[in-house]
Amino acid sequence: MTPSADPSSPSVALVTGAGQGIGRAIALAFARDGTDVVVNDREVAGAQVAAEIEAVGRRALFVQADVTDRTAMQEMFAQAVAHWGHVDHVVSNAAWMQRERVADASWEGFRRTIEVNQFGLFHVCQAAALTLINGQKAGRPPGSITVIGSVHAKFVFANNAAYAMSKAAANHFARVLAKELAPYHIRVNTVNPGWTDTPGERRFMEEDALQAAAAHLPLGRLADPEEIAEAVLYLATRARYVTGSEWGVDGGIVIAPETVCEQR
């Protein structure tokens, strides 16, 4: 089939860091909503997510690439357009965290966090903006970009300077991008997840300690990745008059920041 920008053809979403956790949940949420999905991850786990998407009846394209590789990101969007003719929704989800005190932080870990969370975000969003603008010119409806931020952008958690810095920058970057793309009616929003039950959390805490700490959250538990995905799907596909916003999906951290920040 020849790729087409026909407005009646199925929507396509592209999700970075979709091999596990929040990214996987977002990719599957789009698929269950009737959207074909480009699954990006730097690990081969993304191939399994692509298979899960196909199992629910949608088409999937797995692209193994690191978001810090600028050329690879440009090629990924070109591949998606060549494959399906268009991309409608982009979710910049890939992230990296290195938990260290500033005084003890390794330059390698600090730099990797910034490269993924800031430079990777730029590479993805620049390619996304160009792709969505071109798609609109070819007849597609205006699309959306959703940036996965973090409560770390707003609240002070010790031992997370690089991550907090990068996520604060990401949130403001998204607002600037929203203003730039508003004339095209392309919407850009940020979702700031709170403490979420993902494999990545097990890098830093044992299971018993994690669940005990989660009990101090206002809602008394970690978020499910699917709960973050629900907010992303709504912003991307339903909230047609929402742009430049930041949505906290954090279980109420905003009403008890000091208690929660002490646990991480």
Image (spheres, rainbow, N blue to C red):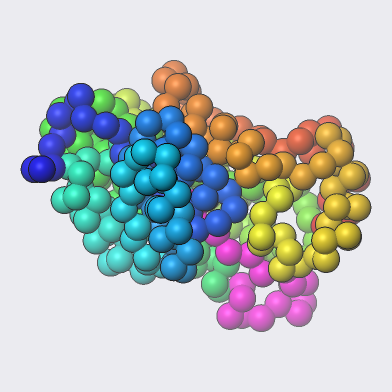
**Residue 30 placed where, x, y %?**
44, 37
Residue under the point 20% across and 44% down: 84
Q: Is residue 115 magenta?
A: no
In the image, farthest residue toward the left:
2
Q: Picture quarter containing residue 223? A: top right
Residue under the point 79% across and 34% down: 252
Number of numbered discs overlaid on the protein picture = 0
Q: Is residue 102 magenta?
A: yes
Chain part drawn in magenta: 93-110
Does residue 180 show up? no
Residue under the point 77% across and 77% down: 103
* Rendered view: 32 above or below 152: above
Pick whichever, 155 or 80, lies toward us.
80
The quarter of the image holding the C terminus is: bottom right
**Residue 200 placed where, x, y %?**
66, 61
* 180 on left or right of 236: left
**Residue 109 placed where, x, y %?**
61, 76
* Rendered view: 161 above or below 84: below
* Rendered view: 108 above or below 114: below
**Residue 45 placed where, x, y %?**
48, 64
* 56 on left or right of 153: left
Q: Picture quarter containing residue 42? A: bottom left
Residue under the point 17% across and 42% down: 85
Q: Main secondary structure of the magenta part?
A: loop
Pick whichever, 246 or 67, lies toward us.
67
Does residue 115 show up? yes
Q: Picture quarter containing residue 258? A: top right
The quarter of the image holding the N terminus is: top left
